[in-house]
Amino acid sequence: MKSTIKDYKIVLYVTDMENDKVMFEKIKQYFENCEACRSLKELCRHLTTKNTPTVFLMTGDNLEESMLNYYRSLDAVKDYTVCEHKVVSLIPLKSEIDAFEAHRCNAIDDYLIARPLYEANRIVLIIEHLLLELGVSLPSMREEQLSKRLTNNVSEEFAALMSRLLEDKNQIELSFKSSIEDIETCLNQADKKIQQHQAVDLDLNKLQETLKQIRSNEIRPKLLELQAKAISLLEKTITFGASGNAEDETDTAKSDEPTPVFNRLYQQDINAQDDPNTKQSAIRILLVEDDLISQKLTVRLLSSLNTKTELAVSGRRALASLSSVKYDLILMDISLPDTNGIYIMSQTKTEGHLNYDTPIIMLTGSKRKQIVAEALKNGAKGYVVKPLTKKTIQAIFEKHLPHLQ
């Protein structure tokens, strides 16, 4: 069954159409909104398509090749709003272990051995799963259709067992939907009372208990809708407290935003390290830090010195920057929301990487011997227990960057 829902997109980045043709045809069988992409400029435009959840499928002869184009494009659009998306690495069998470790660390959302393509149908399941995580509701196969198909390929006993299991699953889903309807009814009643200037009495314990029991990705779109409704309700409540009037918030954002013009790395056939604009007299530092307070303190400290500091707030942003720009120093937080600093460091320490010889200092909130030892083993030049001080950073400059002093 082909999905015809229009609020999503599948983008296959093609490096060898002959190799990837079977994959592309299989995807088009099941998904309406599927495009092949052949250039970094196209990839950048897909990344900045607003309000369109997207699954990117990156091909290559190894993990690094499949992901490098994604990281470079992500770095190129770092000043723009990037669409909510997931990324899948399509790799040969020889790269399976690397892809497995990258997936465990959340550097990629999934992977598939695609050269050669052993499991042609599995890519459909991967895409469906990731779209559900993105909140895209897809039509599912009817129970009788599945039962009929199973009957043609397996024993009648197994088909009957599967039908009973599906019936049980349907009952659970109906229970979930009933819970969602209860929440929506409560929110609608509260909203109506606010409009009538009446007191609101929400059973927060009941709402919390109901939400705790919901674990299905398939109803995430409805949950997101209810979340927006709840936020709107809170805004109205706050407005009443301030002025006694409830007014709908209007969107003042400009709809005629100019088409993004990405950096010239993607308009010309040049390398980032050859771009004269990347040459800086100041010490070029990449700060990888997700904590807002630590970000502000560290950036303020570094700005008082002869530095040009760039900030990456997630592991994937860090990998994107490190794949595109040569830095003099990397300050790496160990705990990040999507992966960990040690994994990112291990990726830069592969021979031939743009930042292979760039010193990395690990930032940590506590001096745990095991983590420190693992960081040093993977190539860190040292570690600092946050917060970073001026005396400490000057000592780092003197030890690891004496030629820039």
Image (cartoon, helix red, strand yellow):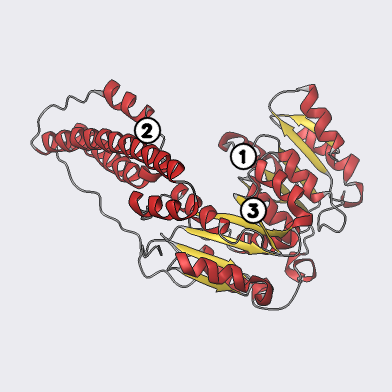
Q: Secondary structure at mark 2?
A: loop
Instruction: Residue at 76% x, 60% y: name it.
Output: 62
Disc 1 from disc 2: Cα separation: 35 Å
In the picture provided, is 55 more to the left or to the right than 385? left
Name the N-terminal-most of marks 3 and 1: 3
Instruction: Residue at 70% x, 59% y: name it.
Output: 91
Query: Is residue 231 visible in the rendered structure shown here?
Result: yes
Name the N-terminal-most of marks 3 and 2: 3
Question: What's the amino acid at mark 2?
Answer: Ile
- Where is residue 313, by image quadrant? top right
Residue 152 higher or lower than 45, as above or below: above
Q: Position of residue 121 (x, y in %)?
A: 55, 59
Question: What's the amino acid at mark 3?
Answer: Tyr
* Residue assigned mark 2: 214
Q: Position of residue 303 (x, y in %)?
A: 68, 46
Disc 3 from disc 2: Cα separation: 28 Å
Query: Is residue 310 visible in the rendered structure shown here?
Result: no
* Residue assigned mark 1: 295
Instruction: Residue at 73% x, 45% y: name it.
Output: 344
Q: Position of residue 203 (x, y in %)?
A: 23, 23
Q: Residues within 10 Å of mark 1 (few under 14, many from 20)?
A: some
Which label lies toward us, 3 or 1?
3
Residue 111's disc is 3
- Where is residue 258, by image quadrant? bottom left
